[in-house]
Amino acid sequence: MNLIHVVRRNTRWSLRGTLLEKVYVKSLLTLIILSLFIALSCWMGFEFLGHSETRCLTPSVRREWRTLSAADKKSYILAVKCLMDLPSIFDSQTSHFDDFTYAHITAGGSSHYAAAFLPWHRMFVHTYEQTLRQKCQYGGAQPYWNWVLDSRDLSQSPVWDSELGFGLDGGSEGDHCVEKGPFAGRRYAWRHLPEKGIAEMEPHCLSRWFRDRHSLEDAEDEVLFLKIYDRISPEYVNETLNAADYSSFFKKFEAGAHNAIPMFIRGEWLNFTATNDPVFFLHHAQVDRLWWLWQDHDPKGRLKEYFGPSENFLGEHHQNMESHSKDVLPMGGLVSDGKVEDYLSTSGGHLCYTYD
């Protein structure tokens, strides 16, 4: 064998070795990435099944605000304040917390008085919860406010505590700016222009003006006040939970118990800027919880039950188009848009949580 043949053979083996090394390295990287994905899935409570399927094994538990320890309440409030200090993904002049209000105004409006109301807000609150965990090191689950427990006097709820809650209202004077509590003195970027359906940047305080007996101005106000407490009473809520089908349930729920809370708090809550108030996410976790309870009455039938109008059925130009579980849930750039079918169950799709 001459020198030329030896060189050629060695070259072939060298090239073959290089190719084998590349294949090995690529396979190793794939294995590492897959292992990390499985580990992350397990950490989040999922079991990896293959073909993009997961099963919820250890769901996080969302608890009622008043049942949390003082340390847990402070931890949650600290995480929300952290989110308010993070830069926006939309506008350099605003915060990441403001991004949720922007998305609620620009993308969430179409879900109201439509079948998507419940799954859209389920995805929205889940996104908020995950953002607190991933960007602000929050170690708990999203708490909820069971306002049925406060149906005798909403103004006395522990969620309004100035130290271990979100502060009281701003009174009847001026802009009703909240002056006590962890979020007093902060500025919020966005206002909603209902006539145009857009968000406008206008930094302002957090405003609340509780509709209590001392603030009633006339007989019409008195009627509305009584209606609020009727809609959050145990009797009315139980009646809502007894709705026979999804369409009947969400229509009665949204127009009833859900709307009663904004009518009580007023201020920011009388518009799509309700998300400027951190209590919004506790309120909508309660809304989600009641849907979860309704589904749990008949999980085999109701976990996939979804139908009703696809747009505001109260609108002047409403078209009677039926919703479908394949419909898109727009998030306005906050995160990638979702699909209804992935948010029908709290223990399937992209979700893995339950309620206490």
Image (cartoon, grey):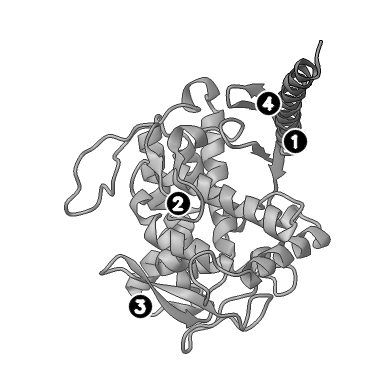
Measured in 3D between alpha carbons, the distance from the residue under mark 2 to the one under mark 1, in whole angstroms, is 27 Å
- The residue under label 3 is which amino acid type? Asp
Task: Please tell me whether mark 2 sits on a helix, a strand or a loop.
Answer: loop
The image quarter containing residue 198 is: bottom left
Q: Nearer the viewer, residue 48 or 326?
A: 48
Asked whether the viewer can see residue 228, the reply is no
Rendered position, 307 above or below 235: above
Pick the residue in front: 14 or 70.
14
Q: Is residue 203 above or below residue 80?
A: below
- To which residue does mark 4 refer? 48
Identify residue type, mark 4: Phe
- Which comes before the other along the chain, label 3 or label 4? 4
The span from disc 3 to disc 4 (Cα, nearest Å) is 59 Å
The image shows residue 297, relative to residue 355, as above or below, that is above
Query: 10 Å neighbourhood of mark 3: few (<14), some, or many (≥20)?
Result: few
**What percent of the width, then of the height, locates residue 256?**
41, 51
Per the image, the residue denoted by label 1 is 36
Quadrant containing the N terminus in the rendered view: top right
| Kind of residue at disc 2 | Met
- Report, in whole angstroms, how far the alpha carbon at label 3 lies from the one at label 2: 40 Å
Which residue in the structure is indicated by mark 3? 218
Give the x, y percent position of residue 123: 52, 45
